[in-house]
Image (cartoon, rainbow, N blue to C red):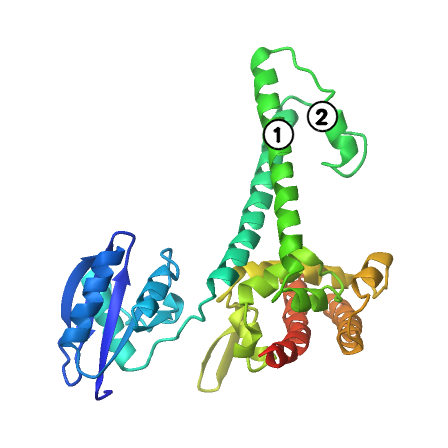
Amino acid sequence: MRDGITHVALDAHMRMLQVAMLLPGSDVPIEWQVANEGGAIRRMVKKIQREAKGEVRMCYEAGPCGYALQRTLKDLGVDCMVIAPSLIPMKPGDRIKTDKRDARKLAGLFRAELLTEVHPPTPGEESVRDLSRCREDAKADLMRARHRLSKMLLRRGIVWEGGKKNWSQAYMKWLRTLSFDHPADKLVFGDYLLAIEHLEERLQGLDSALESASQKDPYRGPVAALRCFQGIDTVTAITVVAELHDFRRFQSARELMAFLGLVPSEHSSSDSRKLGSITKTGNGHARRVLIESAWHYRHPPRLGPALRKRREGQAAAVIAVADKAAQRLHRKFGKLQARGKPMPKVVVAVARELVGFLWAVLYPASAQAS
């Protein structure tokens, strides 16, 4: 038990905050509810400071309410932590969940120092991260819109035979030549095609915005370094940097691999040791783009015109790491395939090792920038 510290836990929702306050020397929390709005939060802070004994520390779980509450409390002079929900200890067999119980449990664990803090981004970092995720959402919407149109054509027996690759310029030109006899078919086809064209324009605009953001500090240096790697261009690079936003908190490459959920799960007891699939904890957005990049290492290392241009003006040490990664990861890809490993496992293993090379480049740069 920490003497002289008042621990306050909040169960935060869009319209309401459930408060549980543990005073020093007491195991019975003081509980009440307040509205999740500026005036009510200020009154809550004044009440806590009036009744608290000694230092005040607050926490709440990360969730859809984001970091706005933490920033508000910080402006009011209160130290507040945002807690990783997936790492909160759970009691087996506990099947009752209410806001009061959640706040009470969080306060007890907070006092016992059993909670893991989420590293909060700055407002600027959060804005660029949301821009990256908006682009990801638009890409997913475009894929769904294309699927709707292609399946509609398949139901009508209309198949593209002008090449192996769909959604090329030739494919889009062919789509605009199609005609239908039934008015409803014309309407459906036109609506699907319009949605695809609109999403393509949105995607181009978001790509341009990400390109512009990558040319500004603090993203210029890290993005340029990551673009030296095979299979990583601007969108992937700024996604990784925006999602992780501070590499100084990862003291080793293994920590970063674990944060990205790329390490195997484990269930070991006594002499038995069992490894399972990857944990998939942490940041799924960065994990996804890194796994996509890992597919490029099935090809032998080659310095093509695009990669050569991306490397112009970059430090020799960064390029050396990128070249070492290309050779090592291609060999690893081949070895795992020769052992008969399923392709998804091969790609994940390569992505995990790729993370180590990225950390080797970005961690020293973050330390120097600080």
Q: Which mark is residue 22?
A: none
At horizontal 47% and vertical 66% (from top left) the residue drawn is 121
CB atoms at circles 2 and 1 under 8 Å apart? Answer: yes
Name the amino acid type tagged 2. Leu
Q: CA distance from mark 2 to mark 1?
A: 10 Å
Nearest the camera: 214 or 147?
214
In the figure, residue 224 lies in which quadrant? bottom right
Name the amino acid type tagged 1. Leu
Res. 96 visible in picture: no
**Element assignment for label 1:** helix
* Vertical placement of residue 239 versus 368, above or below: above
Figure label count = 2
- Residue 288 appears at what percent x and percent y? 59, 58
Res. 348 visible in picture: yes
- Dot 1, crowdedness within 10 Å: few (<14), some or many (≥20)? some
- Residue 91 appears at what percent x and percent y? 28, 72
- Which residue corresponds to mark 2? 175
**Element assignment for label 2:** helix
Nearest the camera: 74 or 108?
74
* Vertical placement of residue 132 versus 165, above or below: below
Nearest the camera: 305 or 78?
78
Viewed as shown, does residue 102 lie left or right of 50? Answer: right
Viewed as shown, does residue 80 lie left or right of 46? Answer: right
- Residue 247 appears at what percent x and percent y? 57, 74
- Dot 2, crowdedness within 10 Å: few (<14), some or many (≥20)? some
* Vertical placement of residue 211 versus 275, above or below: above
- Which residue corresponds to mark 1? 149
Which quadrant is home to the C terminus?
bottom right
Viewed as shown, does residue 314 lie left or right of 77? Answer: right
At horizontal 54% and vertical 49% (from top left) the residue drawn is 134
- Residue 1 appears at what percent x and percent y? 23, 87
In the figure, residue 44 lies in which quadrant? bottom left
